């Protein structure tokens, strides 16, 4: 598979996914992704994207300024 932006090669990696909401920042560590080795663009499969969305929706209810979670622990 090639990057849609620069046509570089994609490789499997674990990345940090950051969501900056108005009241809080949520960081999900260790998210599986395909990452372009030229431009760094990140791609998530459908299941991972759905899991990220569930995690973020659960965590934005917390009244904390910064929340950091591990993807593997939240999905398990």
Image (cartoon, helix red, strand yellow):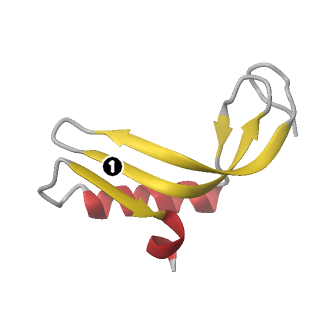
Kindly identify the residue that appears in the image at 56 percent across and 58 percent down. 30
| Nearest the eye: 19 or 46 | 19
Up-down: is 69 above or below 26? below
Residue extending furthest toward the bottom:
76
| Residue 50 percent location from the top left of the image | 51, 59
| Residue 32 percent location from the top left of the image | 65, 56
Kindly identify the residue that appears in the image at 59 percent across and 59 percent down. 48
The count of marks equals 1
Kindly identify the residue that appears in the image at 54 percent across and 71 percent down. 72
Q: Quadrant of residue 53?
A: bottom left
Residue extending furthest toward the top:
6
Q: Quadrant of residue 54?
A: bottom left
Residue 19 placement, left or right of 65: right
Residue 73 placement, left or right of 22: right
Kindly identify the residue that appears in the image at 72 percent across and 39 percent down. 35
Can you say which quadrant of the picture contains the N terminus?
A: top right
Q: Which residue is mark 1?
A: 26
Residue 28 placement, left or right of 58: right
Residue extending furthest toward the left:
63
| Residue 49 percent location from the top left of the image | 55, 54
Secondary structure under tag 1 reads strand
């Amino acid at each position: 598979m090639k990057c849609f932006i620069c046509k570089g090669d994609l490789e499997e990696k674990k990345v940090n996914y950051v969501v900056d909401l108005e009241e809080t920042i949520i960081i999900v560590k260790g998210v599986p992704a395909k990452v372009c080795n030229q431009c760094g663009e990140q791609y998530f499969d459908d299941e991972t994207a759905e899991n990220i969305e569930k995690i973020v929706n659960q965590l934005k209810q917390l009244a904390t300024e910064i929340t950091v979670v591990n993807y593997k622990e939240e999905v398990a």
